[in-house]
Amino acid sequence: MKKIKLILLIPILAFISCEEMNPFGPPPYDIEGNLARDREIVDEYLANTPIDSLYRVHDPSGVIVIVQEEGTGSRPTTNNVVYTNYIGSLLDGSVFDTNIEAVARENDLHSENSTYNPLVFTIPALNSTGSTIQGFGLGFRRLRSGSKGVLIIPSPYGYRDSGSNENIPPNSVLRFDVEFLGLD
């Protein structure tokens, strides 16, 4: 009888002594925590970085749109197709992506396989993702076609903690200098 109790006790002790494991993968992404952290980073960046602008739009999502030249066209809505040139950089100024060949060459990002044409994407429904990062849809909704501006995108609306691009550290706030060429 003592052997049976001991045999039953060993698995129970082993089970309760183990670290708690999440059987469903890593912990969920902390959107609110990262937005709060990013808000402080963005506030400091904007206080210390002069950016010429006509006006700024602070979207409720946390995306900031800095309009440098106002376009005369319409603002895009869900399912509109947008055409844009862009330069993506970190807040330290290091460029990680662009569709402008001269900028790609200047920043050692040039690839012979790239076409360097305007980026074409569809504005997704609110609170959803499309073919670009979510911050693009949120930011471009605030711009008129023909505008030039800067999008400051908090990490939850950028690449989050994905680490999918070696030039973008996880949870990075992103800056995109954009030229809104038009929409369909």
Image: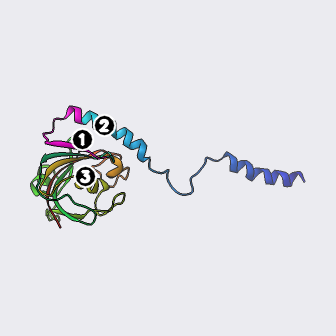
Percent from the top left, x then y, of residue 52? 12, 39
Q: Amino acid at mark 2?
A: Ile
Task: For the N terminus, give its image quadrant.
Answer: bottom right
Say few, some or many: other residues with alpha carbon within 10 Å of mark 1 (under 14 / 14 to 19 / 20 or more).
some
Give the residue displayed 80% in from the left and 54% down from the top.
7
Instruction: Estimate the spatial distance between the alpha carbons at disc 3 and disc 1, rounded to whole Å.
Output: 17 Å
In this picture the colour scheme is rainbow
Give the residue displayed 31% in from the left and 56% down from the top.
134
Q: Amino acid at mark 3?
A: Gly
Image label count: 3
- Compared to 132, does 63 lie above or below? above
Q: Nearer the viewer, mark 2 or mark 1?
A: 2
Residue furthest toward the left? 102
Find residue 40 and report its image quarter: top left
Q: Secondary structure at mark 2?
A: helix
Instruction: Estimate the spatial distance between the alpha carbons at disc 2 and disc 1, rounded to whole Å.
Output: 9 Å
Say few, some or many: other residues with alpha carbon within 10 Å of mark 3 (under 14 / 14 to 19 / 20 or more).
many
Is 120 displayed left or right of 10 in the figure? left
The magenta stretch is 46-59
Percent from the top left, x then y, of residue 116? 14, 62
